[in-house]
Each structure stands twice: as structure tokens, then as C-alpha cells.
Image: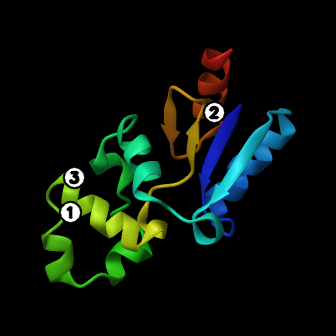
Amino acid sequence: MYTIYGIKNCNTMKKAFTWLDEHHINYQFHNYKTDGLSEALLDSFLQLVDWQSLLNTRGTTWRKLDESVRAQVDNEQAAKQIMLANPSILKRPLLIDGKRALLGYSDELYSQFISQSK
């Protein structure tokens, strides 16, 4: 079973949902806005991907942070605090199959990830 993490109204998330649906892949959606982001859940992500990859420094949530706050995010602990306070700053979608994670979306990446999960 796959779990996809993100926020519902993100265009990249919509593409990922469409791909999963068209390929008849069963998944559970965890919406950070309604389901939240706990420290334990974030720690489980960080077991699979590094904090630098998980932190989306190209999105509007990051750009809206004060420069002094952004400058302090130079280690995993600081990044965790920012991510817990601003879950929409996590790169998305995050697709997890239980033991592996895939960040971002493209048809090719999803095809490879799903085929390797079987």
C-alpha cells in the first residue's frame, strides 16, 4: 500500500493523483493541512530522505519566511522546526511504499518507483 503526502490543491499533487488513478494504484492520501504533521511522522520521513531534499526552498512558503529565519536553517534540527511549523514547506508529493520514498513527481519516476515496489 502506498501513502502519498502533501496538500490537496497543489498542481504537482494533482498530476500525481491522476497518474496513480490512471494506473489503478491503490493509495492513501495524507493531507498536511487536514491530517497534520507530527514530529514522529516527520522523523519517519527523515529516515528515508535527507532534510535538504525534503525542505522545499523553491516554493512560496520558503520565500515568505524572513531572511533571518531562512539563514538559521542549516541543520536537520532547525529544518525540522521549520517543517513542523509550516508543513506546506515540505517538498511534494512524497510517495512512500513502506520502506522507500520518492519525492517530487514525473511519469518516469512514478513508473520506475511502482515497478520496483512489486
What residue lies at 46% left-to-right and 59% top-to-bottom? 38
The residue that disc 2 covers is 110
Badge 3: few (under 14), some or many (20 or more) residues near its Cα, within 10 Å?
some
* Mark 3 touches mark 1? (CB < 8 Å): yes
Q: Name the residue under label 1.
A: 78
Q: Position of residue 61 (x, y in %)?
A: 41, 75
- Identity of the amino acid at label 3? Glu
Q: Which is nearer the N-term, disc 3 or disc 2?
A: 3
Q: In which quarter of the image is residue 111?
A: top right
Q: Nearer the viewer, mark 1 or mark 2?
A: 1
**How far apart, in angstroms, are the residues tagged by discs 3 and 1?**
6 Å
Q: Locate residue 12 relative to residue 27 in the image: left or right.
A: left
Of the numbered discs 1 and 2, the one sitting upstream in the chain is: 1
Look at the image and tell me whether residue 58 can be seen. no
Cα gap from disc 3 to disc 2, whole angstroms: 27 Å
Amino acid found under the numbered disc labelled 2: Tyr
| Residue at screen point 34% across, 47% down | 53
How far from the left and from the top, in percent, is residue 39?
Answer: 40, 57
Q: Considering the numbered disc 1 on the image, is that residue within a helix, a strand or a loop? A: helix
Q: Which residue is drawn at 45% across and 56% down?
A: 91
User: Is 102 located above or below residue 87 in the figure?
Assistant: above
Query: Element at badge 3?
Result: helix
Q: Mark 3 points at which residue?
A: 76
Relative side of 28 to 103, left or right? right
Q: In which quarter of the image is residue 11?
A: bottom right
